[in-house]
Image (cartoon, rainbow, N blue to C red):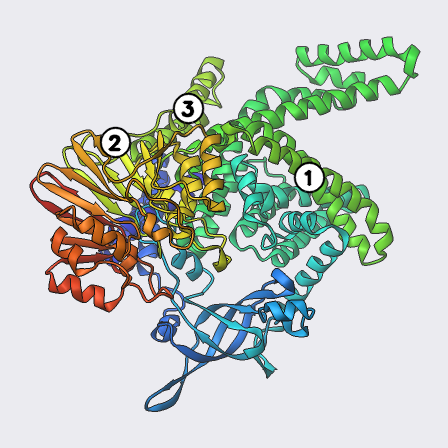
Amino acid sequence: MLWAALAYSCGIVTGVYVWRPALWWLVGGITFCAAGAYFLRRRSYASFALALSALFATGAVMMQVRVPENSDSADVLAFADGREVIVTGHVVKEGNLHERNFGASQQRLDFETEQITTTTDTGTRTFAIHSGLRVTIYAHEVSNEEEQNGPAESTSAQPFHYGERLRFPAKLLPPHNFRNPGAFDYAGYLAQDGVVALGSTKSEAVELLPGFAGNRFELWRTRVRMNLIERVHALWKPDDAALIDAMLIGENSFLGRETLTDFQRTGTYHVLVISGLKVAVLALVMFWLLRRFRVSDIAASAITILLTVAYALLTDVGAPVWRATLMLALYLGARLLYRRKSILNTIGAAALALLIVDPTALLGASFQLSFLCVLIIAGVGAPLLDRTTQPLSRALKSLDATSYDAALAPSLAQFRLDLRMIAGRLQRFFGKRVPLIMLGVTARVLLLACEFFVISAVLQVGFAIPMAYYFHRATLVSLPANVLAVPLTEIVMVAGIVAVSVSYLTLAFAKLPAIVAGVALHAMNGSVRWLGALRIADTRVPTPRLIVILLGTAALVLAMVLSRRQSWWLVLTGWVALALSAFWVCAIPPHPRFKAGVLELTAIDVGQGDSILLVSPQGHTILVDAGGIPFWMHSELDIGEDVVSPYLWSRGFHQLDVVALTHAHADHMGGMAAVLANFHPRELWLSVNSPSPELQTLLGEARALKIPIVLHKAGDNLQMDDAKIAVLAPPRDAESHPSRPNDESLVIKITYGATSALLEGDAEKKTEKQVAKENPQADLLKVAHHGSSTSTIPELLAAVHPRFAVISVGARNVYGHPRQEVLNRLGEAHVRTYRTDMNGAVTFYLDGKTVSSQLAALH
């Protein structure tokens, strides 16, 4: 079954990247089936290969003829242009109500539209449209006067529930993807949940309509889930309840970004999601309890499967829990039929079944990581344990039964005799029965600890490539972190479930298991935070090259094959190959991808902000600004971590030579902390050491990382390989002006041969007039202040006389950038202008004679 799943998966991948007419694949599949049937009794190996080929062709044709789901749901995008419309529809997925400052709150809902009403100059029109929206409903914001007079009753939003029909005004927008290589496909992520547009509205503007839309089963499931969340928050304090929510039912909306990052750094993030580990723990506990109560094997298996299915429905976390549930059902079903236990066969059967239902699941990281995890355990870890600790574990059964010794190998029989001898010496202190039981339990615990250590080590080594590819992390503390976290997670889960269950009978008695869960939770969270704070825990790595991924995959396959050989030398060879592939990923960074012999300037798409990458002809780098989001937007998106860093990692950069901050504004500085931590630049350049608290915090982090801080002002001339850098602003006598930090912008001109570029930051008229006097002719102009009317004055354009210009600006930004008058000036000057909101990341190559451009979105 594993071979079958692999063949079908290869067909899916081929169907995605190698298009052929569907009829070709269909004819090929039928031909392979017929040939396989012919050779079935003549050449079994040939028949087996032909059957796999038929599955390969089936996977390819299934991928190419599939019909996209919700193909009509994009109709709402016709109204997602920022204009206000009236939306009528119903809630399909309710979110939790979150408190904000001063008692205000917000709730995020998944919403299915029924009608869209628009008002234009020609009148009001209503359109029947069924599309998915993700809507954020905000409560009334409390003003200073209301705060002084006491909290108003309207500060708390009314929670809305599944199936309720609502009408509200909203400005709809399509999901925004940052169009850089390596960027996260946010629109695709939302599309998996049927969401094609985003919107927001105020709570007081929402009208609750009569009627119910939905199915009663989903309503019951949602109510039970919300009731469980209320119970959790009644039993534990908010911080503990947030972790319990995530661990028990997969609700992570109450977790802060800092907590999530700590678990990601230590490779323990899996304890915060509903994974196969959670399903296995719960199933094991349920099956064990049922068997202790003398429930028959068949009934215990059936009840365990039913309860696991109910848990999967309740958590509603989608494919991961259903994969684990399917594998559990297959395993228990095979067990009842007295089939020999084969985890690899179970993995193959589960994977094949799920891929037949949804071939696109193979392309998702969740599917790949889930099955890779079980594959590594079953293919590499389990064979090693079967030859080492498992025989000793079987030898510990019924230690007082001497007749069982004869059924074991001589070395295991001697092991039992040694334990009995030691127990005999201890009888004078502990009695006749206790010593043997005590030795057996101690030996089992030690063997279990060894097994857990081996499996954790195998997983850490085997997951090096996917962790680097998807998360750009080398989880060097994953082994000790998981050794501590996973056993404590099992205690938290069992005690937490008992506490929540008992709370429905009496809240007082539920406090005892809640305390047990809380103690284990604090121990786990404390160990994760301590290990996550270590410098080594935050090791980041670029995206591995394709050759590294292929060699790592080959090493994993080799380790799986050799782990079943009798020779320990062959087993060791497989382990060494796997370990070397992990070491390569973690310790040997790939060569950065750049064009030798040319100066590169790339305007990275960071939305409404600036981030410019300069790469010298010899590959040295300067990153000018790192984007960011103003604090008042209340966003947990970190532009430096989530946008700039993935782009640099996708290019193979693991360290920067210089990071320059033009001025202390959030849209230039907000992502800088993550960039400093991830790429450890050799220098940090500033224009003015402003007293801004945000800037001083950033400088403190730079000093903690031992990054030298260098001030540069007008008149400084620097060299980066063959490229020359001239600092044109601010003037040498410039002092910090907290009210006008744009006037402090670091303006630089970089020249390579006869080509040059001028980078202005957010320089305004005053600075531009000073720069224009320097006659800074340049082929390329980074337009100042995102195309604001305060910049790009005619005098500057006349002095620079650029042929190309690039504007770093956010799509549909609230400032109206770039201003039309600026675009008109550039057009009148015959400047070819690019915009990151329309073109995504834009790269310019200066070869010393000419300038050429390249759009990442088209590359």
In this orientation, which residue lies closer to the viewer: 727 or 77?
727
At label 2, the amino acid type is His
Which of pointers 1 and 3 lies earlier in the amino acid sequence? 1
| Location of residue 211 with respect to 725 vertically, above or below | below
Residue corresponding to mark 1:
490
Label 3 residue SS: helix
Q: Is 99 on the left or on the right of 402, as rendered?
A: left
| Location of residue 525 with respect to 151 vertically, above or below | above
At label 3, the amino acid type is Phe
Which of pointers 1 and 2 lies earlier in the amino acid sequence? 1
Residue corresponding to mark 3:
583
Q: Where is residue 126 drawn, in percent x and y?
A: 41, 86
At label 1, the amino acid type is Glu
For label 3, the crowd category at 10 Å Cα-Cα, with few meaning under 14, some 14 to 19 and many 20 or more, is some
Q: Quadrant of residue 712?
A: top left
| Location of residue 643 with respect to 198 vertically, above or below | above
For the residues bearing labels 1 and 2, Cβ distance under 8 angstroms: no
**Residues at marks 1 and 3, CA–CA distance in whole angstroms:** 31 Å
In the image, which is nearer the foreground, mark 1 or mark 2? 2
In this orientation, which residue lies closer to the viewer: 424 or 398?
424
Residue corresponding to mark 2:
620
User: Residue at the spot x=57%, y=45% of the render?
Assistant: 275
Q: Quadrant of residue 276?
A: top right
For label 2, the crowd category at 10 Å Cα-Cα, with few meaning under 14, some 14 to 19 and many 20 or more, is some
